[in-house]
């Protein structure tokens, strides 16, 4: 029996056992359970009320929130503490094993190694990963020319100069903002591109199926790697590989102290932006039905849809070749008539090939985590299948959520199929039979027009 089948069997057993034990505990704890839930609801309300304000009112709201959580814990910890801990541990282990069961590898078609590949690397990115892993030496050992970025360098100019000098493949070792620059030039010239996870979080690498723990191994994409085509996205002509955030987070990253104190800066931004005395967010957009709205707390526009609000795989993109933007609006939206509409979940999401946002002022934005200020209207567009991505054959080649079902029922059924040996899928969202993009779909940079 394979490790994948064993993980699926264990996930089903632990999940069923954990749920059964949780039900027994809940019945035995009645009516303390509902009272504890009420305490948690009051705690959340008080904490949110405090976060939207400043000074003593904020401190009081947060204090009441902590008291509510403490009361809920005290109610549930009076007895049967061991059973509660076992139930929580069993459910957590079931989720971890389910994640492992759904992880897979994409079968990427092999491609010939490029003759003059170039690696651009930022020595300071990711806390100095390039130096720690001796990326320059590792690149030379694979016949890849390394080019180090220095303070003040224009990365786009360096990449274009390398292409003009004959580079036939481009790789970037750095943050996602730098990845977007190199990927845009690679797509414009239809050159192979490799993402080396030498940044801090490496979100693009994760969703491409690059092993983020194997920085050096990512260079093998230009040795014996497979290839797939993925999408890029743009806002007003600027390419991004992950997402553009507008609203609360975008306001926070504009502040000078954000890099050194992210949480404190974000907490300070909440009342100033969406609090009762805040400036508000004057952003206008149209939903999938064509109705004009004004934004809630935040808008996230992504290069393909993110998996959100799920027990496993949340915050990743199942695929990056769907040819659609992902649009997520968090919080209350105001319709054309002025009425507020709170969705069933605290966010609403949909997919579209294009999305526009308008305002009467310059709009702060976070583009792949970097602060920017954009002039309205913001025109988001998807560029389907324009980027040729190479991935080492020793890496997954697919997003960790590529094969994850959408719901609990579908997940249980999929685990049962895997456990029974009736699921021969290896995961992955890349197809070896992807057709090349037509001429109309190929990348055309606004700078090259």
Image (spheres, rainbow, N blue to C red):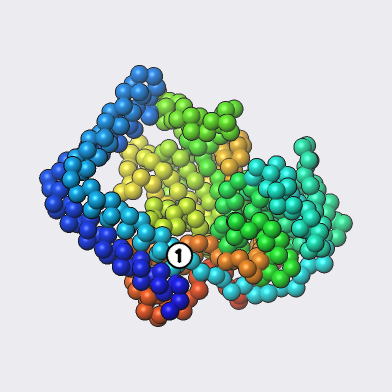
Q: Position of residue 16 (x, y in %)?
A: 27, 65
Q: Quadrant of the N terminus?
A: bottom left
Would you identify the image quadrant in which residue 413 lies? bottom left
Residue at 77% across, 37% down: 151
- Asked if residue 120 is positioned above or below residue 251 in the image, the reply reads below
Q: Secondary structure at mark 1?
A: helix
Q: Is residue 382 visible?
A: no
User: Does residue 79 lie above or below 152 as drawn?
Assistant: below
At 55% from the left and 45% from the top, the residue drawn is: 244
In this rendering, would 360 be left or right of 418? Answer: right
Number of residues whose C-alpha sits closer than 10 Å to that of mark 1, classed few (under 14), some (14–19) or many (20 or more)? some
Measuring 39% from the left and 19% from the top, which residue is drawn there? Answer: 55
Q: Which residue is mark 1?
A: 100
**Among all residues in the image, which is located at the extreme right?**
165
Pick out the residue farthest to the top: 56
Front-most of residues 338 and 125? 125
* Residue 292 locus on image (x, y percent): 43, 44
What residue do we see at 36% from left, 24% from top?
58
Percent across and percent down for residue 256 are 59, 27
């Amino acid at each position: 029996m394979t490790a994948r089948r064993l993980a699926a069997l264990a996930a089903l057993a632990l999940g069923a056992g954990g749920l059964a034990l949780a039900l027994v505990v809940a019945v035995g704890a009645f009516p303390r359970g509902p009272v504890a839930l009420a305490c948690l609801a009051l705690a959340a309300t008080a904490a949110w009320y405090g976060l939207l304000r400043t000074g003593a009112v904020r401190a009081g709201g947060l204090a009441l929130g902590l008291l509510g959580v403490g009361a809920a814990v005290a109610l549930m910890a009076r007895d049967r503490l061991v059973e509660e801990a076992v139930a929580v541990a069993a459910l957590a282990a079931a989720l971890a094993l389910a994640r492992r069961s759904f992880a897979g590898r994409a079968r990427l078609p092999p491609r010939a190694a490029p003759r003059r590949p170039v690696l651009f690397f930022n020595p300071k990115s990711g806390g100095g990963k390039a130096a720690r892993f001796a990326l320059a030496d590792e690149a030379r050992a694979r016949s890849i020319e390394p080019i180090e970025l220095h303070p003040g360098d224009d990365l786009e100019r360096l990449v274009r100069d390398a292409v003009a000098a004959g580079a036939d493949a481009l790789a970037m070792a750095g943050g996602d903002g730098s990845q977007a620059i190199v990927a845009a030039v690679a797509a414009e010239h239809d050159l192979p591109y490799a993402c080396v996870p030498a940044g801090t979080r490496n979100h693009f690498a994760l969703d491409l199926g690059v092993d983020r723990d194997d920085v050096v191994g990512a260079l093998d994409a230009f040795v014996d790697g497979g290839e797939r085509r993925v999408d890029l996205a743009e806002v007003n002509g600027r390419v991004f590989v992950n997402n553009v955030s507008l609203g609360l987070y975008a306001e926070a990253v504009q502040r000078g102290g954000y890099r050194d104190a992210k949480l404190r800066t974000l907490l300070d931004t909440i009342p100033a932006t969406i609090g009762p005395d805040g400036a508000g967010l004057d952003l206008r957009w149209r939903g999938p039905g064509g109705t004009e709205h004004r934004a809630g707390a935040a808008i996230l526009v992504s290069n393909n849809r993110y998996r959100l609000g799920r027990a496993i795989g949340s915050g990743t993109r199942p695929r990056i070749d769907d040819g659609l933007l992902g649009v997520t609006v968090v919080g209350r939206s105001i319709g054309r008539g002025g009425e507020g509409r709170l969705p069933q979940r605290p966010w609403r999401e949909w997919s579209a090939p294009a999305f526009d946002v308008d305002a009467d002022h310059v709009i702060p934005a976070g583009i792949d985590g970097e602060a920017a200020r954009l002039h309205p209207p913001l025109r988001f567009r998807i560029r389907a299948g324009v980027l040729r991505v190479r991935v080492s054959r020793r890496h997954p080649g697919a997003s960790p959520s590529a094969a994850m079902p959408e719901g609990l029922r579908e997940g249980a059924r999929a685990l049962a199929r895997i456990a029974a040996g009736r699921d021969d899928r290896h995961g992955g969202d890349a197809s070896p039979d992807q057709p090349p993009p037509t001429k109309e779909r190929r990348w055309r940079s606004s700078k090259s027009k």
